[in-house]
Amino acid sequence: MSEIEPAGALRLLLEGNERFISGQRLHPNQDADRRTAVAPAQRPFAVLFGCADSRLAAELIFDRGLGDLFVVRTAGHVVGPEVLGSIEYAVATLDTPLVAVLGHDSCGAIAAALDALQEGTTPSGYIRDVVERVMLSVLAARDRAVADPEAAVTEHIRYTVELLATRSAVIAERVADGRCGVVGLSYRLAEGSVRRIVGHGV
């Protein structure tokens, strides 16, 4: 893909999502010619860091194909060193101009954190680690989330965007000089639509 600005990358994502919603998908870059073209090297126009939920297949939601998106997914889009390293690789080495954080309604990780907060217990095993990482966001939206659990989803998207934009010196530097943007998007499972929550540099 040719040189593209962060705002242009976001526009490509949103236009693809509009096609997905309307059923007018183009299925771009999904043929043998594209496979051959990107085999030697990749130049994705966006990092898509999203929840690992099976209903959030990035290339489908945004009507994209091979080599378009650098996808990183974890339950509840929680951030650890491996996630930061993967995203930094895309931004610094592949010159990807946009990092999009994709959260969604009815998120199991958010629900588990809300349950843990209300019941005073946390899950066992490594699920506990996921819940603990989501808990800061849930606590910040605690009063609102009691009436509307989606307030916690929105807060967690905001939290993740801020974390990426400030914890990683690589990302922060590129946002500051206009080479990269970080945006938070919220996906509606039933509608298939995304809406912007917050952004830096885009």
Image: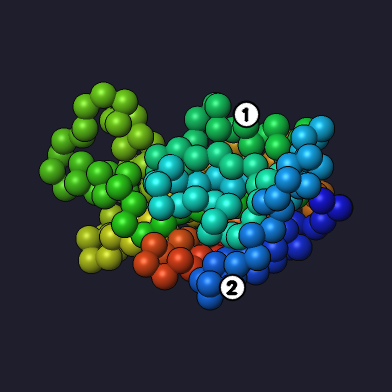
Q: SS at mark 2?
A: loop
**Secondary structure type for disc 1:** helix
Q: Count the marks.
A: 2
Instruction: Say which residue appears at 41% left-offset and 65% top-offset.
Output: 188
What residue is drawn where x is 55% and y is 32%?
A: 83
Mark 2 residue type = Gln
Q: Quadrant of residue 199?
A: bottom right
| Residue 98 in sight | no
Amino acid beneath label 1? Gly
What residue lies at 20% left-to-right and 41% top-to-bottom? 116
In the rendered image, residue 25, in percent from the top left (x then y), is placed at: 60, 67
Q: Residue lying at the far bottom in this picture: please name it.
A: 22
State the separation of the CA atoms marked 1 and 2.
35 Å
User: Where is 173 relative to 154, above or below?
Assistant: above
Which quadrant would the C terminus be assigned to in this image?
bottom right
Q: Is residue 82 visible?
A: yes
18 with respect to 145 (left or right) = right
Q: Residue furthest left?
A: 119
Looking at this view, is 72 or 109 the one in front? 72
Q: Nearer the viewer, residue 24 or 185?
A: 24
Q: Which mark is residue 24?
A: 2
Q: Residue 85: which numbered mark, if any?
A: 1
